[in-house]
Amino acid sequence: MKTTVITALCLLVLIIQVRAQDSSIIVERKVITLKEVVVRNNLDVPAFIRRIQLDTSFYRAFKNLRECSYTSLNDIRMMDKKEQVKGSLQSKTIQVFSKGCRTMQVLEEAASGDIKSKDGEWNYYTAEMYAGLFFTQGMVCGENTSVSADELSLHHKKGIEKHKEQLKMLFFNPGRKIPGIPFIGDKVNIYEEPMADLYDFELDMQPHGGQNCYVFTISARKGLTEIENDRLVFNTITTWFDAQTMTIIARSYDLSYDAGVYDFDVQMEVEMSPLKELWVPALIRYTGNWKVAFKKRERGVFTATIFDVVKD
């Protein structure tokens, strides 16, 4: 018993010492908490934060897939309110990229429940969005593979194409304002005031998938009032950066919002894999519960597993 108490006291002292070595820095009026290992590493934190805000490596990794051949396992499941599967689709697809064009072949497919209508149309918007983002119809050639900031735009887009573009903005540039989403407005603009005041920003250094990484975490500040909590869209965003190249190799999101006419509660995870000098997505997970006025609530889970990636 005495040994246990002494051990516990030693651990407590160690934790206090480590926390005491954490530091803080103010960058563009945001307080960034630096864990002790980051302080010792002498990282140029202001430059790092600016790089995060302007990062294109995450988008670049997904664009890389458009110029590669690869195999994908696709698992889409739509659930009822009791978390039972109402409709599902599991498939194995292969993309072939050759001479500037890509095509996709379905090697295996099993559908169940009401995932599709009798005429083959998707019955769920979640599944339709997945198909629009990850399934290729016919042959696609001469794509624009740039990752410029101007590329993600709602100009001349409507319907599902507009919603896909808004989703890409949220996915690839989290924390930036997204036009055209009613009632959210500037609430996703978490790097700027007043939203930045509602979040804690922390920078740490940890291993991830065999890589030494900087880990940047944005999380809702504790002790917020009910009114402040109601303004939050992002609960947490955690991003892992390769410590040598500063390339994003993993990211997780937890976001939710209730606007009355619509609400959502979504979690996403993305894991990257190296391909020679490039990075490409290897695993994408999504769990979402959302409702829009005049449409039925959708509870969906999907996983995309990408492997055997080859770039000519």
Image (tube, helix red, strand yellow):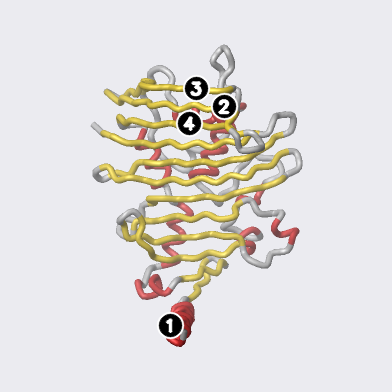
x and y percent of residue 151 in the render? 48, 37
Rounded to the nearest angstrom, the CA distance separating label 2 from label 4 is 19 Å
Q: Nearer the viewer, mark 2 or mark 4?
A: 2
x and y percent of residue 275 in the render? 27, 42
Q: Earlier in the sequence, mark 1 or mark 4?
A: 1
As helix, strand or loop, the secondary structure at mark 2 comes to strand
Where 33 falls versus 180 (above or below)? below
Q: Which mark is residue 87?
A: 2
Per the image, the residue denoted by label 1 is 7
As helix, strand or loop, the secondary structure at mark 3 comes to strand
Tell me, yes or no, whether the two marked residues, 3 and 2, touch with CB atoms within 8 Å. Answer: yes
x and y percent of residue 297 in the render? 68, 34
Per the image, the residue denoted by label 3 is 111
Q: Nearer the viewer, mark 1 or mark 4?
A: 1
User: How crowded is the residue under tag 4: few (<14 C-alpha within 10 Å), some, or many (20+)?
Assistant: few
User: How crowded is the residue under tag 3: few (<14 C-alpha within 10 Å), some, or many (20+)?
Assistant: some
Q: Nearer the viewer, mark 2 or mark 1?
A: 1
Q: Which mark is residue 133?
A: 4
Q: Earlier in the sequence, mark 2 or mark 4?
A: 2
Rounded to the nearest angstrom, the CA distance separating label 2 from label 1 is 53 Å
Where 222 falls versus 105 (above or below)? below
Q: Earlier in the sequence, mark 4 or mark 3?
A: 3
As helix, strand or loop, the secondary structure at mark 4 comes to helix
Rounded to the nearest angstrom, the CA distance separating label 4 from label 3 is 19 Å
Identify the residue at horizontal 67%, vertical 47% (top origin): 257
Looking at the image, can residue 17 be seen? no
Identify the residue at horizontal 58%, vertical 44% (top origin): 266
Instruction: Between residue 55 and residue 287, name the one nearer to us.
Output: 287
Q: Left or right of 46: which side holds 120?
A: right
